C-alpha cells in the first residue's frame, strides 16, 4: 500500500527514460486486440506517462483538502468503457484491477446507461429511503431479482448494508446474538443484562470473540479491524480486542510437487484453530464464530485447498461456532462460480456469507437460524441503497444472459496458462502463479520489483494491483475475455524481457 | 424502537374504530394548507389505515427474507413530493420524520430530477470508483462546491465515507493516530509496534479510549457501539470495550424556571468528565478523545446549554483529548445553522466533526493537525460515492438559493411556539417542549401514550418519529415552512383534544 508512494517515485525516474513513455502507444502490442464486446475499446492508447500532467495538477489540489498520496491518477469515467479505464490525460488503459475488484461488468455498460435513462427509475436515485422502516414498493422484488437469485445454497435470508466493513460488522453482531440466544435458551433477557449492556459490561455485553486468520483482511472499522491481519499500516495505533488469530496455510507451489507438505501445513493450521477455541474458552472468552476469506486477497492472494475449508467448517460445527465466509472480494463471479466458497462442496452450508464490491451494495446472507429475533437489532438509517439494488438486478441479468461465470473460468484459464508460461520463462521474476477463474496472482522477488513492474505496466497501458508484500493480483471485470488475457500477456512478456 | 411493533398492534385496535379511519381525509384540517413550494402537495390525503392492505401484503413478503417487523409501511417514492410521503395504498402524509432525518430538501426535488436527466452526469452513477486511488476529474471541485463550502470554521480537511457509523469509526481512528503521533513525537514507529499491532496487542494497538455520554447514539458498528448508550436493544449481546461513559445533563423545563438547577446539573456532568479522564488514565487507559452530539437525538432529544459545550471543549483541550462533534443527525441546517455546534460560539473549533444523513454522504471534517501522516491509513474501497457528492452539491446550492437555514429558524419558531401552546393546553400529555430550528421535540407521559399518539397522527396524515423512552421528535426536511407547521399543529391539536 505505502508501496504506491514508491510507485510514483519510480514513475518520476522513468520519466527520464523518454523512449519508454513519450511516443504514445508504439510499445504496446496490438496483436491480440479484438472487439467482441461492442462498447469495449480495442486496446490501450497511451499519450503521456501516468500520472500525467493533468493528473498531477489535480492530485496537488486534492492534497490540499485530504491526504491524496494514495491516488494513482485521476480518471475520465465518461470516456472509460468496458475493460478500459481512461485517465484525465487521455491515456486509455486495460484495467485488470477494476477499482480494487469492484466493477462487475465493465465501465459504462450499455445496460446500466439504459437503466439510468428510464424515467421510472429516477426516483430511486434521488429519494433514498430508510430501508428498514419505509422501503419502496419494489424492495423485495429487486432483492429477489438480484441478491436472492444468486444466494448461496441454504441461505434464504439477506440484509443489505452500505459497504464491506459494515457488512462484516453486522455479520459479527448477528453471530453474537445467535450465540447468546443459544446460551440463553428460552429464558428471558435479565434486568442485569439490560442494565450492564448500557455501560459496555458483561453479562449484557458478553466476552465473545471472532476467530480470524493471520493474513486476513475483513475491513477497517474497529470490529472488523480486530480480525484483519494483513498489513501493519491498517492497524497501527488503533486499539483492538483480544480475539484469537490462527495461522493461515502458506502453500508451496507448484501444488502438485508439494502435496504432502501442503497437507501437513493445512493440518497444522486446523489444529491451531481448535487449540485456540479451547484455550480462549478456558479464559472465559467464547469464540462465537470463525471468519475466513475463500482466498486471502489483500493479504497476498493466499489460497488453501477445498479440503481445508471443508474441515474448517466441520471444526466450527463441532465447537458450536458460526462459520462466516467473507466474499467481499471473492464474490460476484470472478472465480467462475458466483461465490468462491461454492467450489468447496460443503455438505452443510456456511452460516453467514458477506459481500460488497462487485455486488454494488454491501450486505450478508444467512441461514434462517441466524435471523435476529426482534426488529431494530440489525439496523441503521439507510441499510444499503435501493439504487444499488436496482443496478445490481441489471448486472446479474447481464451476468446470466452473457454467461459470464463460464467466461471467468475460460478467460481465467487463458490468463493462468499464460502466467505459468511466463513463470517458466522468467522464474527469477515470477513465482507461485496461482488462481481460480480470473482471480489470479503471482509473486515477484520483492516489494521493489513488484512496484516497478506495476509502474512499467501502467505506462504500457495496463492497470495492475498489488497485494501482500510482493504479489501482483488480477482483478479484471467479468467481461474480461480470452483476447484481453492475450493482449495483457503480450505486453507483459515484453516488459519481462526488457526488465532490468 | 421495539415500540413500533406496539404501534402496529395499536393500529389493529384502531381499525375497529371505523369513524377514525375509513372515511378518507375528513378529519384532517386543511385550514393551513397552502402551496408555496411548487412541487409540494397541498395537504395530506388518507385513503386507508396505515399500514394499508398493500403495505401489509408487502411486509409479509419481505418478512420471508429478513426480519421486517420494523417496517412502518411501504412507500411509493415516485409519487412522493416535497414534504409529503405517499404510501403504496395511496395515502399521502405530511412527513415530519423524513427518513430518520435524512432527506434534505424534500422528495423528488426538481433540481435533483434535472441533475439526473443531464447526460453528462450518467457516468457518475454507473461507474463508481475507488475514490482513494482513482478519483474522477471533478472530485475536488465537487467537494469544494458541496462539503467544503459549508465546512465548520477552522476545519479545512474533509474525508467522505459511506455512512454515519463508518464516519465515526474513521474519526476515532484519525484521533487515535493523532494522539499516538503526539505521544511518539518525532520518533519512528518501532519494530515492536509494527509486530504487536498485527496481533491486536499493545504497544502497536494502544489501550486508547473515546469518552462518550450516557444517552448518546453514535452508530452501531463495534467501535461506535462502545460509545452508544441510548437503548439496550442496540447493545445487548454484543461484546464491547471498557471506555468511560459520563452522565449527560438532564435539564429541567421550562429552562427559565430552573436556571440554577440546570447550571448545577451541567457542572456535575462536566466534573464527572474530568474525573473519568483522570481515573481511566490511572488505570493506563488513555482517553484520546471525547465524542458528543450537539443534541442527543436517538437518546431522547437531550439538550445542554451552549455554555456546557464550551466548557466541555475546554476540558478536552486541558487534558489533551480531541474534541469530536457528531453532527450526523443535527447537521445539514435543521437547527438554523448549517452545523448545530455553530450555535455554541467556540473560541477554538472542534477538532473533528462527523456527518451523514441529510448530507447524503457520510464523512468528517477535521483540523489540519489531524491529517493522517501517510496514505492508506484512513482508507477503504469506496470512500463514499461521487454520485452522492454530485447530488449534495446541488442540494447545498438549493439551501443557499432558497435561504433554507433562515427558513429552518423561522418555521422552527412557528412549530415551537405552537407546541408550547399545546403544552399549556394539554400538560397531562405534553411536557418538556424543546428545540432549536425545526429540530424540536416534546415528552409524553410514557412509551404507550407516545406510540399511540404517533399511530393516530399517522392515520390522520402526519408521519412522526419517537426517540428516547417517551419523546416525539420532529425531523422535517429543510423545505418545511411555517404553513406546514400550522397544518401539523391543527391536526395534532384535534388529536390531543380527542385523546383518551
Image: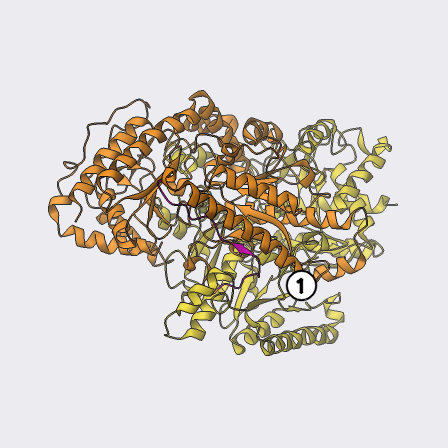
Chain colours: A yellow, B orange
Chain letter, disc 1 residue: A
Q: Categorize mark 1 by other alpha carbons within 10 Å: few (<14), some (14-19), many (20+).
A: some
Residue B262 on the magenta span: no
Q: What element carries label 1?
A: loop
- Residue at 50 percent across and 47 percent down: it is A162
- Residue at 57 percent across and 72 percent down: it is A285
Residue A476 visible to the viewer? yes
Answer above or below: position of A4 versus A122: below
Residue A43: x and y in percent read 67, 36
- Residue at 42 percent across and 39 percent down: it is B102
Looking at the rendered image, the quarter that the C terminus of chain A falls into is top right
Answer above or below: position of A444 versus B495: below
Residue B239 on the magenta span: yes
The magenta span reads: B238-254
In the current view of this chain or complex, which residue is farthest to the front?
B260
Q: Name the residue under label 1.
A: A303
Residue A401 visible to the viewer? no
Amino acid at each position: 500500500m505505502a508501496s504506491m508512494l514508491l510507485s510514483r517515485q519510480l514513475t518520476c525516474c522513468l520519466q527520464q527514460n523518454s523512449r519508454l513513455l513519450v511516443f504514445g502507444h508504439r510499445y504496446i502490442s496490438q496483436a491480440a486486440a479484438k472487439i467482441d464486446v461492442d462498447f469495449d475499446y480495442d486496446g490501450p492508447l497511451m499519450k503521456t506517462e501516468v500520472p500525467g500532467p493533468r493528473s498531477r495538477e489535480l492530485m496537488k489540489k486534492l492534497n490540499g483538502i485530504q491526504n491524496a498520496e494514495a491516488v494513482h491518477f485521476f480518471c475520465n469515467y465518461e470516456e472509460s468503457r468496458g475493460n478500459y479505464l481512461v485517465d484525465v490525460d487521455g491515456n486509455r488503459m486495460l484495467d485488470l484491477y477494476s477499482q480494487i475488484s469492484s466493477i462487475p461488468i465493465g465501465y459504462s455498460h450499455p445496460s446500466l446507461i439504459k437503466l439510468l435513462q428510464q424515467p421510472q427509475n429516477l426516483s430511486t436515485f434521488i429519494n433514498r429511503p430508510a430501508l428498514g422502516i419505509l422501503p419502496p414498493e419494489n424492495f423485495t422484488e429487486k432483492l429477489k431479482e438480484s441478491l436472492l437469485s444468486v444466494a448461496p445454497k441454504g441461505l434464504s435470508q439477506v440484509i443489505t448494508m452500505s459497504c464491506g466493513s459494515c457488512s462484516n460488522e453486522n455479520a459479527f453482531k448477528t453471530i453474537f446474538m445467535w450465540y447468546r440466544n443459544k446460551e440463553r435458551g428460552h429464558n428471558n433477557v435479565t434486568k442485569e443484562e439490560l442494565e450492564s449492556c448500557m455501560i459496555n459490561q458483561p453479562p449484557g455485553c458478553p466476552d465473545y470473540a471472532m476467530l480470524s486468520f493471520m493474513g486476513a483482511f475483513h475491513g477497517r472499522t474497529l470490529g472488523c479491524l480486530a480480525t484483519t491481519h494483513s498489513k501493519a499500516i491498517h492497524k497501527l495505533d488503533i486499539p483492538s480486542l483480544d480475539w484469537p488469530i490462527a495461522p493461515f496455510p502458506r502453500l508451496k507451489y507448484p501444488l502438485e510437487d508439494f502435496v504432502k507438505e501442503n497437507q501437513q501445513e493445512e493440518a497444522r493450521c486446523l489444529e491451531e484453530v481448535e487449540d485456540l477455541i479451547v484455550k480462549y474458552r478456558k479464559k472465559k472468552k467464547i469464540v462465537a464464530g470463525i471468519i475466513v476469506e475463500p482466498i486471502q486477497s489483500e493479504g497476498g492472494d493466499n489460497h488453501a485447498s477445498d479440503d481445508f475449508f471443508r474441515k474448517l467448517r466441520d471444526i466450527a460445527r463441532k465447537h458450536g461456532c458460526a462459520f462466516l465466509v467473507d466474499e467481499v472480494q471473492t464474490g460476484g463471479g470472478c472465480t467462475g462460480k458466483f461465490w468462491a466458497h461454492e467450489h468447496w462442496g460443503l455438505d452443510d452450508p456456511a452460516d453467514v456469507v458477506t459481500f460488497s464490491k462487485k455486488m454494488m451494495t454491501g450486505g450478508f446472507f444467512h441461514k434462517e437460524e441466524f435471523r435476529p429475533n426482534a426488529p431494530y437489532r440489525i439496523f441503521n438509517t439507510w441499510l444499503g441503497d435501493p439504487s444499488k439494488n436496482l443496478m445490481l438486478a441489471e448486472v446479474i441479468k447481464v451476468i446470466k444472459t452473457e454467461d459470464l461465470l463460464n467466461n471467468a473460468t475460460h478467460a481465467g484459464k487463458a490468463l493462468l496458462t499464460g502466467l505459468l508460461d511466463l513463470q517458466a520463462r522468467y522464474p527469477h521474476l515470477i513465482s507461485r502463479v496461482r488462481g481460480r477463474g480470473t482471480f489470479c496472482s503471482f509473486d515477484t522477488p520483492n516489494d521493489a520489483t513488484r512496484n516497478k513492474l506495476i509502474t512499467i505496466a501502467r505506462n504500457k497501458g495496463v492497470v495492475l494491483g498489488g497485494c501482500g508484500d510482493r504479489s501482483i493480483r488480477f482483478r479484471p471485470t467479468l467481461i474480461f475475455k480470452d483476447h484481453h488475457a492475450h493482449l495483457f500477456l503480450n505486453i507483459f512478456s515484453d516488459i519481462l524481457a526488457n526488465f532490468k
